[in-house]
Image: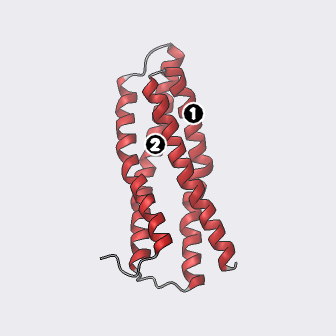
């Protein structure tokens, strides 16, 4: 596969990965802040589906196309921008994996509460706090990766 095609796939995948993550986070946060149990149940169900369809597939595609780009373009593996990009990606994915689990728990708890006509229980709020806390470093890691990929600074420190 040629460099331009690989780069296009890599950029589109990163756009879907980041866009789905930020969009899903926004909608789940907004629904949660309304405290409307039904809205949270519906939104969390859709967020989990979006994560499985878009985020999971692109989270796998990113390192594959990134590796192929490095090889095709003969980028040096010891370049700081590349090493830090990989480290930040690992950090972001390490935060995202528990977030997926938390979202599934939040979905289940919200659906049960909505079915019972009850408010969101304390378990939902515990999951939500952890979901939020883990989302912050993932967001900043992805923003830093975008900068590193675009700037490709010769030295970082």
Gap in angstroms between the C-alphas marked 1 and 2: 13 Å
Q: Residue at x 36, y 53 (%)?
A: 137
Q: Where 73 falls versus 94 (above or below)?
A: below
Task: Count the numbered circles shown.
Answer: 2
Find disc 2 in the rendering and name its residue: 101
Q: Residue 45 carries which label?
A: 1
Q: Where 74 falls versus 68 (above or below)?
A: below
Residue 8, located in which quarter of the rendered image? bottom right
Mark 1 element type:
helix
Residue 85, located in which quarter of the rendered image? bottom left
Task: Residue 136 in the image: state x and y as whole percent.
Answer: 37, 48
Q: Residue at x 65, y 79 (%)?
A: 3
Nearest to the eye among marks 1 and 2: give it. 1
Q: Where 94 falls versus 106 (above or below)?
A: below
Task: Residue 36 in the image: state x and y as whole percent.
Answer: 48, 21
Q: Where 48 falls versus 112 (above or below)?
A: below
Left or right placement of residue 13 versus residue 85 in this view:
right
Within 10 Å of disc 1 (Cα), the crowding (few <14, some 14-19, many 20+) is some
């Amino acid at each position: 596969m040629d460099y331009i095609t690989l780069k296009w796939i890599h950029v589109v995948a990163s756009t879907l990965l980041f866009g789905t993550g930020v969009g899903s986070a926004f909608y789940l946060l907004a629904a949660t802040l309304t405290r409307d149990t039904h809205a949270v149940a519906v939104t969390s169900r859709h967020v989990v589906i979006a994560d499985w369809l878009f985020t999971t597939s692109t989270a796998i595609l990113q390192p594959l196309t990134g590796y192929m780009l490095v090889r095709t373009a003969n980028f040096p593996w010891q370049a700081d921008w590349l090493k830090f990009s990989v480290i930040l990606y690992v950090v972001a994915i390490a935060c995202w994996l528990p977030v997926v689990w938390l979202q599934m728990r939040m979905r289940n708890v919200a659906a049960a509460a909505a079915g019972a006509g009850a408010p969101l229980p304390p378990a939902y709020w515990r999951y939500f706090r952890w979901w939020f806390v883990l989302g912050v470093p993932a967001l900043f890691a992805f923003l830093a990766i975008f900068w590193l990929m675009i700037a490709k600074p010769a030295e970082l420190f």
